[in-house]
Image: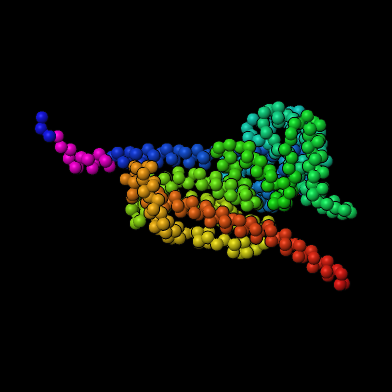
Amino acid sequence: MGDLKVGEQDLAEMSSMIQSTVVMEASKQVQALLTSLETTMLDIAITGESGAGKSTFINAIRGLSDEDLGAARTGVTETTTEPMVYQHPKLPTVRLWDLPGIGTSRFQANQYLKQVGFEKYDFFIILASERFRENNGNLARSIRAMDKNFYFVRSKIDQDIKACQRHQNFNKERVLTEIRTDCINCLEKEGVESPKVFLVSSFELHKYDFHKLQDTLVRELNGQKRHVLLLSLPNITVEMIEKKKESLKRHIWKKALLACLISALPTFPVHYNAPLLMETLASYRKNFGLDDESLNTLALRVSKSPCNLKKQITSSLGKDFSEHSVHSALRMAALGGRASVSLVERHVPLLGNLVAGGISFVAIYILLSSSLDSFAQDAQNVLKKAFRAEEEEKLEAYYSQDIGFLYD
Ligand SMILES: Nc1nc2c(ncn2[C@@H]2O[C@H](COP(=O)(O)OP(=O)(O)OP(=O)(O)O)[C@@H](O)[C@H]2O)c(=O)[nH]1
Ligand SMILES: [Mg+2]
């Protein structure tokens, strides 16, 4: 038999076919992972007696005021008479269910959970204002009996604090502890073991126990549901912003791989899919409340000028988000990331052949990761300006009033 030589042309064709098949398959799989994350549903039921503040709480979590378009209707008379679903404005797969008030003529306690279709909810938040009532205990027990979790929110705490401020020897912490202990005792008396109770004001989410409620909800969910819940929660503590960042970081590699695998345009020094990268960065900005819409809504809520909040944003992509600025940031990331390329290629040898020596992947990965760091820092600065300064300003106004009074 003579020598069998494989022609160079054949090798090139074969290599190109194998590479494109691998790219197609890898893209499909990464896309499937991302789609499953983006389509994870989370259904949260908000329940409790009529007038407890359920609709107002939903609006606050969605970052809306009661008068905003699409906000749940609220009021001093019974307003919610059918289960109503509200999508989270930034994450449509997170749905908040505004359930009708328990114990009203239409919804009697014993039939209530069946009437509202309890199976579809991931967990329940029971809201109760003022004194503890029997209906709340019944509801909590029934939810447990159906093997679902509930969290008990004692609402309108701002009202209680305001009323107690008139008393002599007012001590805010003591009042809060009394209310919390009373709720726990009443629930335990009704046969509910170790209830989780949180004191909340929907008008001032950043005060009292709302951050503890957020932490508990996040801790008690797993996997993809935990991720979507985290992203849907308001940025009202530094810890929450950090948790969001960490959760998003875990998925960067998928975004980076997809953005470079499906790229076709050879644009020196990196090959990437620009729309996908822009879309990812835009969603990060929204997650951290740095887009114009989120900043305007926050400014309205805390009675600050949107300009003052925007001034707290110092990262380059936070201030100037455009295709041009993203492209420049990517070039910088490509230059800075050259050292990491060999490491990536050692672990994923095919990547080196497929996407310009791995530089595209590394550059996009670095850009996404550093953007998350800087957006999270921006979000913390905005948070400080929005809430902490407000307290200081109020304090200043309060003392200047007192002085005015003394000198009158
Ligand atoms: N001060 C104070 N008032 C609140 C708070 N939450 C709700 N309210 C007021 O309580 C009243 C009832 O609030 P809703 O949110 O409509 O109550 P609901 O539980 O949805 O009532 P139904 O739909 O009838 O079951 C409204 O006047 C709200 O403005 C709060 O945190 N603090
Ligand atoms: Mg309502």
Image coords of residue 286 (percent x, y): 56, 52
Image coords of residue 359 (percent x, y): 37, 51
Q: How many marks?
A: 0
Residue at 20 percent across and 40 percent down: it is 10
Residue at 14 percent across and 34 percent down: it is 4
Residue at 57 percent across and 47 percent down: it is 244
Report the coloring of the rendering. Answer: rainbow
Quarter of the image for residue 196 reads top right
Quarter of the image for residue 55 reads top right
191 or 20, which lies in front?
Answer: 191
Q: Is residue 114 above or below residue 90?
A: above
Residue interval drawn in magenta: 4-16
Q: Residue furthest left?
A: 2
Image coords of residue 178 (percent x, y): 82, 44
Image coords of residue 320 (percent x, y): 50, 61
Q: Is residue 322 magenta?
A: no
Q: Is residue 179 above or below residue 114?
A: below
Residue 108 in sight from this viewpoint: no
Quarter of the image for residue 295 reads bottom right
